[in-house]
Image (cartoon, rainbow, N blue to C red):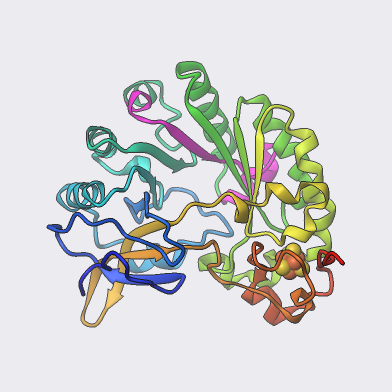
Amino acid sequence: MPLPSPGFVPSATQVSELDSGGDDRPWIGPEGQVMERLELHLTYHCPERCVFCSEEHRMQSYRPFPVTWGRVATILRTHAERGVKAVHLTGGEPTIHPRFIDVLKLARKLGMRTSVGTIGTRLQRPEFAAAALPFLDEALFSLHGPTAEVHDAVAGRAGSFDQVTAAIALAHRLKPELGLFVNTVVCRLNIEHLPDTAALADRLGAKLIVVSNTTPEGSAWDAYGRLAVPLEDLATWLPQVPDRAKNAVVRFFGVPMCLLGPHAMSSNDLHWDPRVTVEWQSAPGKVAFAGIYSWAPDRRRLHPPACDPCARKSVCMGVYDEYAARWPTNGLRPFPRQG
Ligand code: SF4
């Protein structure tokens, strides 16, 4: 299937099998946005077993299909030619890709900013961190609790908390100018610890703290009934985060804007960039490396009837579809319309 052409107006999300290049026209979105961000799934392996891992099903399906260096190099080159200016490496755990540092070097050579989402698997090691950090602009570390007891229970492995906090501290020490970010995913197991988690991330030097709601995909889909945080509890705990993160910017991902109290402007729905996510996809008789083109942060989200009177319906993406299918949404607090 050919790549979308300039002027092509896709739906919010479109999947296309990737070709090998030869087209240098940028991707243009429905509002005229230019696609500048690439999310690349480098690996389908991870040593952790997070209870809410949105990638668990894809990891089970695609683990036998390694993402080779040749394929990565082609993806980076073709996307750079089409105007992509930043790559975020994700997985699985991307740092365990055997050529992780070469991937960073090539992305930089192609003029891209580089970023990784990691739980610190290899960045906890001083020699690896010293080799990788010069080629990294940003690192988004997964920290899911303020103590080993809370984080390790969620991450599914004893020692995970010590690993990620060591990696954060090392990155902060070796490269103070790094975009040092923390992602914390909230579920029923850790929501009441969220303010303390934010305070810890802040003390460790995070410049940005992303609070992500559990997305009903992968392992979280399997256990959504016991993981999803009720809207009323989100409204209790989320607005406490900015006061505990004294120095860091805070963003809330996958959360109804009306549950953020005075921090509605910290909704990531307002600060989100279009992105192409490149990963294995099932295709008839094979798997294919495909691009998923997202122009709005509306993946798996919808507006239930409770949103109808809301003044911010055009900028807030609402609640997760599976949440609305299972539970009442009368915990939403629609913003009043003026006049
Ligand atoms: S009422 Fe609906 S549209 Fe309005 S802020 Fe809440 S979730 Fe978003």
Residue 145 lies within the magenta run: yes
Left or right: 160 as drawn, with respect to 334: left
Left or right: 261 as drawn, with respect to 190: right
Q: Nearer the viewer, residue 154 or 303?
A: 303
**Viewport quadrant of the N terminus:** bottom left
Left or right: 195 as drawn, with respect to 175: right
Q: Residue at x 58, y 49 (%)?
A: 271
Q: Residue at x 78, y 60 (%)?
A: 258
Examine the rendering and report whether any part of residue 234 can be seen.
no
Q: Residue at x 37, y 54 (%)?
A: 35
Q: Position of residue 164 (x, y in %)?
A: 53, 35
Ligand 1 lies in quarter: bottom right
**Viewport quadrant of the C terminus:** bottom right
Q: Provide the residue span drawn in magenta.
A: 132-156
Left or right: 117 as drawn, with respect to 45: right
Q: Position of residue 123 (x, y in %)?
A: 42, 31
Q: Is residue 42 above or below residue 137?
A: below
Q: Is residue 49 above or below residue 339?
A: above
Residue at the right extreme, as displayed: 339
What is the quadrant of residue 284 in the picture?
bottom left
Examine the rendering and report whether any part of residue 111 can be seen.
yes
Residue 112 lies within the magenta run: no
Q: Is residue 123 above or below residue 19?
A: above
